Image (cartoon, helix red, strand yellow):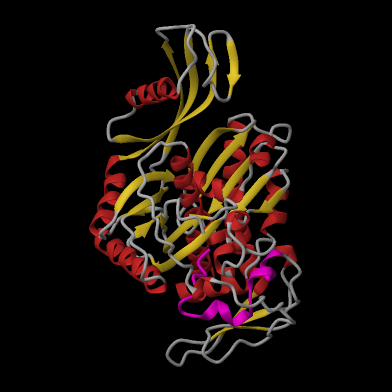
Amino acid sequence: MNPEQPIIVGLDIGTTKIAVIAGRKNEFGKLEILGFGKANSNGVKHGQVLNIDETIKAIKLALENCLSLNPNLNIGEVYVGIAGHHIKSLQTRGDIVRESEEEEITQAEVDLLISKQYKTYIPAGDQIIDVIPQEYTIDNMPNIVRPIGYSGVKLGANFHIITGDKNAIRNINRSVEKAGLYTKDLVLQPLASAAAVMGQEDLEAGVAIVDIGGGTTDLAVFADGVLRHTAVIPFAGENITNDIKTGLGVLKSQAEQMKTQFGSALANEAKANAYITIPGLRGMPAKEISVKNLANIIQARMSEILDFVTYHLKQIGMDNRHLNGGIVLTGGGSQLRHLIQLTEYVTGLPARIGLPNEHLAAGHIEELAKPTYSTCLGLILKGYDDFENNRKVFEKSFINIPVPQDLIRTSVPVAVQEEVLVAEDNTTASVEKRQPLKNFWDKFKNGIIDIFKEEEDGHL
């Protein structure tokens, strides 16, 4: 542990869960997790805070859970993720004329150029969340990644500006403030997720991050090391759950369990002779549901989400030639079986699951390496990016706060054997004639019953 580094806290206010993770970089540049807490989210819909009181309660509960693991932590400032239908983006161009063309360009001049973009005209009721430089130009020299040290008369750049609704931003800040915390910065969720699951080589090759959350699917496209596009797609895991609830006539909790335990994004991969048994309500007979019908519902909605991704890529002229890194799926919804195959079929691009474990120090608990926590861990990494580039003032901690034992992995996860055919009595579903799975999801399940633990955050 390196006490010279500050402790940075990420707060992910999602539609299905609220997570708090505190971390500090060690001497190898990896994140040591010092605290972790989560709570069910009740006041957020489609990424927006609608019920402030419920959101405050959930933030406080997640914070309490985090501090119960490590009472030595003192959490005051947090990096907060933001998403929602209201998020928009636009491209702008900015230039400044320098006073002395002979002197080298300084960081102060770059900061001045960026700060001027905050005066860009945007529609009434919106607010600029972030201004991200793309390529710089100096006089007639284009495509400069880092202009500091060059000299010239005119310094310019292309910018990607992210905006959001003022009221939505105000609700987030108010919820965080009333929970006893201070918002250090608001970070667009797909950019945080990208920081957690990608390396520099991915940015250079060209890649599209698709973060499938509970309320929204967030998209960020990178090429040649530069952010090219961001978008928020208004469909995600909760829409799939509601489709199952309506289409199969079951409770929402049952729909969620069926999705996470038996769901597949490809109907052709589902067993035609497998059925899920749902206990009847108040003496009603049990209901049998075809696993194939379940997969058909999931595939229809997930295909719609991927069609939106394809549409955005076509709008900005990004195809196979520009995105050699393909599509990186992350977020809770990326854990659906056979989603990689469906993504490759719909988009025509190679796909993989983005895991945040590359940036985690050895010995972390397995749960934090799930795509569900990509955004929260990415917020910590974005905070460190600010710290390392002296963008903000940080309070350093010179006290060696230990990593709590609960956050250290003590055993290797047991490989999943032949799947259980009938669920336990206290669950709401059972299945017949299941095949053992040979895909990504198996790496993360310690046993099929984990899905049904009340504290498990199984939302996709």
Nearest the viewer among 182 and 350 is 182
Q: Position of residue 420 (x, y in %)?
A: 68, 85
Asked if one can make out residue 249 in the rendered structure from this viewpoint, the answer is: no
Q: Is residue 235 left or right of residue 180?
A: right
In the displayed structure, 146 sits above or below 6; it is: above
Q: Position of residue 351 (x, y in %)?
A: 70, 49
Q: So how many labels did they put on this image? A: 0
In the displayed structure, 260 sits above or below 27; it is: below
Asked if one can make out residue 53 in the rendered structure from this viewpoint, the answer is: yes
Q: Position of residue 58 (x, y in %)?
A: 33, 66
The magenta stretch spans residue 446:
yes
Nearest the viewer among 406 and 302 is 406
Nearest the viewer among 39 and 298 is 39
In the displayed structure, 185 sits above or below 108; it is: below
Q: Position of residue 85 (x, y in %)?
A: 41, 45
Nearest the viewer among 263 and 33 is 33
Give the image quarter of residue 271.
bottom right
Q: Residue at x 63, y 29 (%)?
A: 317
Q: Is residue 272 left or right of residue 145?
A: right
Q: Which residues fall within the magenta stretch?
A: 440-460
Q: Is residue 24 left or right of residue 420?
A: left
The magenta stretch spans residue 322:
no
Q: Residue at x 27, y 35 (%)?
A: 125
